[in-house]
Every structure is written in C-alpha cells, then in structure tokens.
Amino acid sequence: MIWLARIWAAVRKVVSRWFETELRTYRVEGDTLPKYIRPNQLIHLVDDGESWSAAFMCPCGCGDVLEVALIKDARQSWTLSVDTENRPTLHPSIWRTTGCRSHFWIRKGHIHWCGKTG
C-alpha cells in the first residue's frame, strides 16, 4: 500500500501544477500578443521601453483572453507592479461587463474574487 500512496502523491503534485492559479509575469517586447497564452501567464507588453498592456486568460475558465491598457493616458487604464518572484499585481480590479461577468483582483499572482454580477 505504500507504493500506492507514493503514486498518488506524485499524481497530485503534477495535477496541482496544471491547475495552479498563481500567475507569473512574462515580459514581451512589441505591441503584439503571442498567439497562445497559458492560464498561469500574464503577458506584459512593452514597446520602446513603455508599458503598453497586460494580457491573461480569464480566471473563471471561460477561455477568453483579457487585455488591459497600462498606458496612463488611456481612457481606462491599470497599473501593473511585479514582485521579485515575477508575480503580478494589477490595480484597479478587473470587472467584466460582458461574457462571464467576472469581477476579481490580481494580487501577488493570486486571483481574489469579488463575485459575479447578473
């Protein structure tokens, strides 16, 4: 039975990585998003040394890629900070008014749910 416990522990470790909700920031030069964004990635687009936008998959699981502006002069913009472990924090919260209508914060790479509307 010990072998079964060891196998189960190994499987749990692998599966937990698949469903890891902690985001990590990946800096990309230019103004074009990559074709594919993994669920645990936040893409930080930087063009000519200026933060342009941040993009990530919606944490609710709907499959949508969300992109927020980081340009201060934009009508609606966010502030991105990244800690020493590449974990992002976005301010203000993300509140989707279409699609899944999720409302959440991203703090140190973790999703903090505010609930869903509608």
Image (cartoon, grey):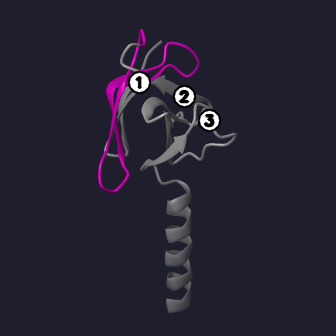
Marking on residue 94: 1
Instruction: Find residue 90 and report its image quarter.
Output: top left
Q: Secondary structure at mark 2?
A: strand
x, y percent for residue 72? 36, 18
Tell me the kind of residue under disc 2: Leu
Residue 57 showing in the rendered view? yes
Mark 2 to mark 3 CA distance (whole Å): 11 Å
Question: Which residue ends up furthest to the right in the rendered image?
Answer: 35
Which stretch is magenta? 74-103
Q: Which comes before the other along the chain, label 2 or label 3?
A: 3
For the point 51% across and 69% down, the residue is 12
Q: Residues within 10 Å of mark 1 (few under 14, many from 20)?
A: some
Name the residue carrying label 2.
66
- Residue type (three-letter) at the residue carrying disc 1: Ile
User: Label 3 amino acid?
Assistant: Leu
* Mark 3 → mark 1, Cα distance in angstroms: 19 Å
